[in-house]
Image (tube, rainbow, N blue to C red):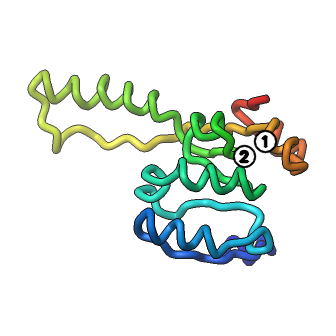
Amino acid sequence: RAAKLLKINLTLRSASDASSLQSVLGRMGKNDGEAIIFGSPGLRHRYQALVLKWALANGVALVGSREDVVKQGALFSYSYDFAKVGRLAAGRYVDRVLKGGNPAEIPIEEVTEYELVVNRSIAQKHHWNLSSAVLVRATKILD
């Protein structure tokens, strides 16, 4: 629905392992899309290096899931700070359980802080225009 409202052509491709992902990428050409975003966290984490290599070679923007992927060449990522969430989990949950707290009684917390990390040098390399609205909202801009 969001793609339709934004007048973005969305093409879904399905893959479940490295072989089917390589097959999907092998059939894609530059006219098949301007960007790739993963819907599956499992595939994204397992095969992100493969897709990043393909995207960089084919001039297709990759939406990464973490800052380190943006540093490697993804155009941007919008996610939470994984290290911060890990520290919070250790400090709040693990600490309470180790002190005898009942895990069922510990309230669940939701991540509320997200980071928009943008790789301006990748955008410039591929002649992609980043609007000032995106750059103003970016938490970090990598050059």
Residue shown at the point (65%, 34%) measured from the top left = 71
Q: State the mark number for residue 75.
A: 2
Residue 38 has which mark? none
Q: Please tell me in which quadrant of the rendered image residue 76 appears.
A: top right
Q: Residues within 10 Å of mark 2 (few under 14, many from 20)?
A: many
Q: CA distance from mark 1 to mark 2?
A: 6 Å
Q: Verify CB contact (< 8 Å) between mark 1 and mark 2.
A: yes
Q: Secondary structure at mark 2?
A: loop
Residue 46 spot, x, y in % from top left: 43, 52
Which image quarter holds the C terminus? Answer: top right
Q: Amino acid at mark 2?
A: Leu
Horizontally, residue 69 falls left or right of residue 18, namely: right
Instruction: Please state the horizontal and vertical placement of residue 41, each as a whole percent of the image.
Output: 45, 56
- Residue 143 higher or lower than 108, as above or below: above
Please give the residue where the numbered disc 1 appears in the rendered image. Answer: 122
| Badge 1 amino acid | Ile
Quarter of the image where the N terminus is located: bottom right
- Asked if residue 62 is positioned above or below residue 124 in the image, the reply reads below
- Give the camera-side residue of 103 and 133: 133
121 left or right of 37 in image: right
Q: Is residue 4 above or below residue 126?
A: below
**Residue drawn at (51%, 67%), measured in percent from left and top?**
21
Q: 139 or 46: which is nearer to us?
A: 46
Element class at badge 1: helix
Toward the viewer: 22 or 34?
22
Q: Position of residue 110 (x, y in %)?
A: 43, 44
